[in-house]
Image (spheres, rainbow, N blue to C red):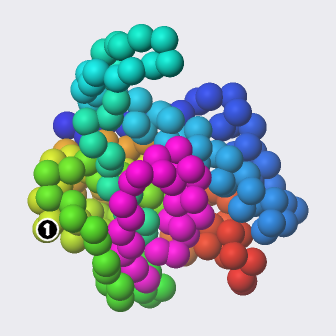
Amino acid sequence: MSQIHVISHPLVQHKLTQMRRAETPSERFRQLLNETSLLLTYEVTRDLPLVTTEITTPLTEMEAPELVEHPVVISILRAGNGLLDGVLQVIPGARVGHVGLYRDHDTLEAVEYYCKFPPIEGKTAIVVDPMLATGNSAAAALSRIKEENPAEVRFLCLLAAPEGIEGLQSAHPDVSIWTASIDDQLNEVGYIVPGLGDAGDRIFGTT
Ligand code: URA
């Protein structure tokens, strides 16, 4: 069954508060999101399996741990790209996929317009999108990713609405979620409240 991990680390919470402030400009927002994504990645990868390998240090030989394999990172366009750089700073060996979905503003349903993945079969996929709002885009992206037969899928976001968590868990009960906050609710047009506004607009300076 899906688990929810709320990342309560003080640095994450502090940076999130700065991101929530309406007056925080795009440049600063991007920087904060990048810094936060390093810390979120630390948590989402905490239990990745290790294998012991024999290496030689300048002093001696030893058995040392290293990752069995790198996870694949999938960004849900476009706001997912705001998390991607930070994730790749921590896991530079990861291969990256993108899936593009737009939210129909009338139905709030997700419609796919772009999809390009590296090999995912048998691997752990970490799917990144800052906002888990209705959960429709995330659920559609996860369905598409699962067609590639990953061994495991993890969902990493910055903010989640209770409605999005419920939607994602009922569509994908096997996918665990990592988030910095579970906010109060969605408003009538599908924004997370209190939230931080439109993450894509905040990252890229669009309106
Ligand atoms: N997407 C966003 O960028 N913000 C929200 O509050 C909800 C969905």
Residue 144 pos. (x, y %): 22, 71
Residue 24 position (above or below residue 105): above
Residue 96 position (above or below residue 19): below
Nearer to us in this view, 62 or 78: 62
Q: Residue at x 52, y 75 (%)?
A: 78
Q: Mark 1 packing: few (<14 Cα in 10 Å), some, or many (20+)?
A: few
Disc 1, SS: loop
Nearer to us in this view, 167 or 204: 204
Residue 165 position (above or below residue 46): below
Q: Residue furthest right?
A: 23
Residue identifier under label 1: 147
Boundaries of the magenta span: 77-102
Residue 123 pos. (x, y %): 21, 50
Q: Residue at x 35, y 88 (%)?
A: 113
Name the quarter where the C terminus is drawn. bottom right
Q: Residue at x 48, y 51 (%)?
A: 92
Left or right, residue 119 beside residue 40: left
Name the quarter where the N terminus is drawn. top left
Q: Residue at x 31, y 15 (%)?
A: 63
Residue 39 in sight from this viewpoint: yes
Nearer to us in this view, 71 or 103: 71
